[in-house]
Image (spheres, grey):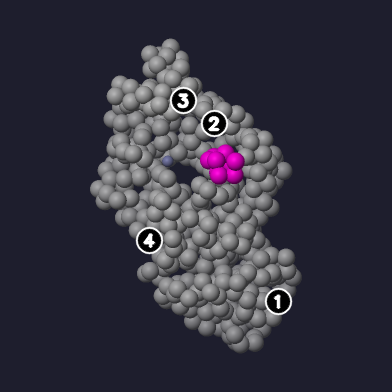
Amino acid sequence: MENCVKIVVENPTPRHDYIFSLIFNQLLGISYCYVSSNNEAHINYTSVSLRGIQCVPHGLLAEKNIRLSIIDEVTFDLWLETPCFFRTGDTSLPFDLFSAAFFLVSRYEEWLPYEADIHNRFPATASLLHKNKLLEEPIVNQWALALKDTLLYEYPTLIFNPRRFEYLNTLDIDQAWKFKEKGAVRNILGSLSDVVHGRQENIFARWPIIMGLKQDPFFEVFDWHNSVCSELNIATIFFILVGDYGKFDKNIPHDNLHFIKLIQHLQKNAQIGIHPSYRSNSNSTALPTEIQRLKSITNTPIHLSRQHFLMHNMPQTYSNLLAHGIQEDYTMGYSTHLGFRAGIAAPFFWYDLENNKATGLKIVPFCAMDITPLYYRKETPQEAKKTLRNLLTKTAEVGGHFVSLWHNESLSETERWRGWRCVYNDMLKAVNEIYNQTIR
Ligand SMILES: [Zn+2]
């Protein structure tokens, strides 16, 4: 018998195709197909009582437009022990989890008006998952697994091959060097600023480093990082800022020969992606220029991207990235909060709600950024280790994708980052423990 989840849907739309493909093909490792109401179906996704497990549709997947009033329909409740919304009936699938998953993964609420933060971004505090204390739950993965159990209970011959835990290490390079390679003007101004702000550590460290008497702490990280990742066999993506200097864009000039050499060196053991500058959000020529710079340095096409400052607006940012050849974006996440911005611990394709169609842009969400435990949660390194381990465990329980976001700066053991390398080490150790527990 064909191993395929058979679904009755009155009129399948691009939204149905999109969410069924995500839940069945990508999360549960089983194909799905549409059947007519006369056939034996596993899932009856209609409001009429038929054979199969009935899930009464909320209606969202049949719509074509973006609707403001939908926000009022999102009320969280429990399905078994799992929080869920869009309750539609009293069947064994009492919630329309397909519409709920679509709502979260399409980031529907980010297409609606919201009060932006100082960088004009959608703030975590505006999100429904945050308001319902669910940001740290990979809820879409949990729904998919609960759906699998419900199906298996009724149809034990179905064979699922659900996704397994996976870890991805990513580093943003906002400043490859702390002092060196920044030039005399920046360092003289930097020295004055150190004195004005009483940054004693920098006052003493800066000039010996510039004179070559000591290693630059941001740059020194790369060799150490490479040896750690090689030892643990961990793959890395570096997202590199090559934009022009500006208030929020402070990397080394893109034509600095040492910077070029560093990028070419990093590319030997890792993937390289673009880190579009802050400026690129308001200057239309910046993104293609920066991609071209990185392409010339690496001599390879640039398909991976993460926005500097996580600058993102729906749909402009993704449309712009797509228009310039980016195939995967790694911006989905928050700096202020840990967890799963889209409710999912797995990559998915961006759904363009305005044009009501799936796109070829793969969104790879991250769930843990270095600054979050240190600055926003005010945690000590010891507390941060525990927090990250908890999040890893939660992700592993659903076979999720755990993407971490660090900077070479946060691994430099300088200023506020003193004592944080061990947090990173512990996170990698925990990843290794999970890999060893699961059969790969
Ligand atoms: Zn950045």
Q: Amino acid at mark 3?
A: Arg
Residue located 46% across and 17% down the image: 204
Q: Compared to 104, does 265 lie above or below?
A: above
Q: Amino acid at mark 4?
A: Pro
User: In the rendering, which numbered label is found on residue 92?
Assistant: 1
Disc 2 to disc 3: CB gap under 8 Å: no
Residue located 67% across and 51% down the image: 394
Which element type, helix, strand or loop, lies under badge 4? Answer: loop
Q: Amino acid at mark 1?
A: Ser
**For residue 76, side relative to residue 71 (left or right):** right
Q: Quadrant of the N terminus?
A: bottom right
Disc 1 to disc 2: CB gap under 8 Å: no
Q: Is residue 211 visible?
A: yes
Where residue 360 appears, x then y in whole percent?
Answer: 41, 59
Quarter, ligand 1? top left
Which element type, helix, strand or loop, lies under badge 2? Answer: helix
Q: In this picture, which residue range is highlighted in magenta? A: 370-378
Which element type, helix, strand or loop, lies under badge 1? Answer: loop
Q: Is residue 300 visible?
A: no
- Indicate if the residue with disc 3 has its beta carbon within 8 Å of ligand 1: no
Q: Residue beneath label 4, please?
A: 315
Which label sits in the foreground, 4 or 3?
A: 3
* Disc nearer the start of the sequence (2/3): 3
Q: Separation of disc 1 and disc 3 at Cα? A: 62 Å
Closest to the observer: 424 or 115?
A: 115
User: In the rendering, which numbered label is found on residue 417?
Assistant: 2
User: In the rendering, which numbered label is found on residue 199?
Assistant: 3
